[in-house]
Amino acid sequence: MSGMVEKRGIGTWLTHAGLILGIAIICFPIWIAFVASTVTQDDLIRPPMPLLPGPHFFDNYLEALLTGGVAPVWQMLLNSLVMALGITIGKIIISLLSAYAIVYFKFRFRMLFFWLIFMTLMLPVEVRIVPTYEVVASLGLLNSYTGLILPLIASATATFLFRQLFMTIPDELTEAARVDGAGPIRFFIDILLPMSRTNIAALFVILFIYGWNQYLWPLLITTDPSMNTVVMGIKQMLPTGDQTVEWPVIMATAMLAMLPPVLVVIGMQKLFVKGLVESEK
Amino acid sequence: MAEIKLEAIRKSYGRTEVIHGIDAEISDGEFIVIVGPSGCGKSTLLRMVAGLETITSGDIHIGDRVVNKLEPRERDIAMVFQNYALYPHMSVFDNMAYGLKIANVPKAEILARVNEAARMLELEPYLDRKPRQLSGGQRQRVAMGRAIVRKPAVFLFDEPLSNLDAKLRVQMRLEIKALQRKLGVTAMYVTHDQVEAMTLADRMIVMNAGVAEQVGAPLEVYANPATLFVAGFIGSPPMNVLSHDIRPGRGPLDPGAVIGVRPEHIDLVAPGAGLIDFDVAFCEPLGAETLVHGVTAAGDKLVVRIDGGVQLPADGTRVGLAIDPARILAFDAAGRRTEI
């Protein structure tokens, strides 16, 4: 081991150079997008393409936030946030409860229900989008947060994950809680929830990004621009036909749309990694 | 404080009956140990008393109530589990206080009771720690503390020492006994370790294959085993079993019947001077005592326990075995004790 740490030769430099090059390649498009969001449209379309940030950062971002495309970006960001949080929190609550029922309660057709939930893994939104749209439309949920969130809220993956977690919790712990006098709901709140918190954090990150990046479903059910989400909003800002477009504004919108998932990942990084790596028994 | 009465307790899983009718009366403040090999139903019996397993038939009384249908928390019991079953996300204090919090005991009283238990178990410096920051022995103490603070009528122990190393096990064994004496609470203790059973019990229930083979005080059970199983299970090394009667002036045993004699009731003498001769196979010197293993001419294997200071017989030599005939126990073909 010490030999590996002590090694300071050309090999180390080469490895680092390789890594830096790789990171540069991956980050380059994002850098270009950032640069494009800080210059004017004229600067941008005149070759050569600028590679260093320009002075119009605030102009472009303010325009994007307050005017945007069909709707101001702040509103679309808010819609995205509500939808992503709704999907994330809803999914976590529902899958925690269903996993709790499947693991801890003996009822008729328990395994049938488990497999029913599991089978929905094979039916992502895209596959069932027409019947789902039909149901949502006939319930009058088009252009509403409920309509955006509800159809995406059931999650077989999360249910399965919590089921596996609960199954690793020793029976004796459940029995100790029973002897201590904890009923089912108390046990769930006092024992199971705290013991699942790292997994909940990991799922929160994954599901938030899943919810934030939803494109097809919001595109389908929101006709009112004030209900647009930011991911579909970017697409709608793109030129159709002969329209001229403000690329710097679109790039500013893209940068803004990228921000919340990044913040969530950074904010929950510690718990997220803990949840994926460690099982604390 | 309470008596426990078990009346014809049976337990079946589907069609398989695992406990075949157990009767026992445990008096107030008594320490009773249920001992038996793995799979004999001893833990199941304890869990039925705790209310963690349903009772197929029979009645369990705790105090003056029949508790068959009651939830564990309504039975006024506390249980210590084999793996301690501490809540990993709670501090030692919260682990001990959890049951009281649920029972809506006032905060000040919880604090007083937990501190009292922590003082008794020498856990005071660890109250803020999480279970994973404790050693095995300390976790065991927390599990006991959790039982103590509830001031139950009955303590139930399910093999609480089997995860500890040998030295700690002896130490905790003494602590458990001292604690139970001090609190005067009725205790039921399940173990597969006959040494634990002998040292802890006021009375013990020796179980085998879902049946209580014998109930009695440890020394009484040791001296007067009711069945061949008990004779073999209680005592280490186990009782010697011979298929040929070696008592003077006796005819052959009935088919399947055997006689037994404890290793410490045999003395080594010159060949031909004892009841029977045997060839020494090997010796196990343990310091204070030595176990001499050998085979009789009839093919019965025997172990003799002699003092550690005595000159060891060489392997392969023939020696005589002097046995007081009054120490010899007889068992019939079904393994039941028969009179001489």
Image: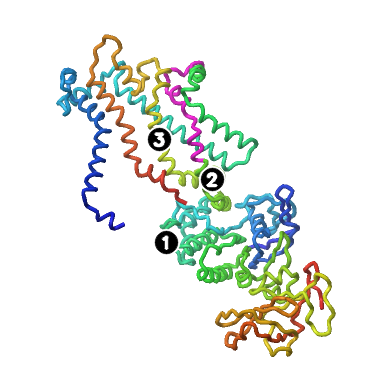
Q: Position of residue A19 (x, y in %)?
A: 26, 41
Residue displayed at 16% across by 20% down: A47
Is residue B287 toward the left or the right of residue A18 in the image?
A: right
Q: Name the kind of residue labelled 2 in the image.
A: Met
**Marks 2 and 1 in Cβ contact (< 8 Å):** no
| Circle number at residue B126 | 1
> Is residue A157 within the magenta segment?
yes
Q: Position of residue B339 (x, y in %)?
A: 81, 76
Q: Position of residue A66 (x, y in %)?
A: 26, 21
| Circle number at residue A206 | 3
Residue displayed at 56% across by 44% down: A184
Residue displayed at 33% across by 20% down: A233
**Marks 2 and 3 in Cβ contact (< 8 Å):** no
Q: Name the kind of residue labelled 3 in the image.
A: Ile
> As rendered, which of B173 and A23 lies closer to the eye?
A23
Q: Which residue is mark 2?
A: A167
Q: Are marks 2 and 1 on the same chain?
A: no
Q: Secondary structure at mark 3?
A: helix
Task: Report the colour scheme.
Answer: rainbow
Q: Are marks 3 and 1 on the same chain?
A: no
Magenta region? A137-162
Q: Secondary structure at mark 2?
A: helix
Q: Residues within 10 Å of mark 2 (few under 14, many from 20)?
A: few
Q: Compared with residue A146, is residue B75 higher up or lower down, i.e. above or below?
A: below
Provide the major secondary structure of the magenta segment: helix
Q: Which chain contains the residue that carries disc 2?
A: A
Q: Tell me the CA gap for discs 3 and 1.
A: 37 Å
Q: Nearer the viewer, mark 2 or mark 1?
A: 2
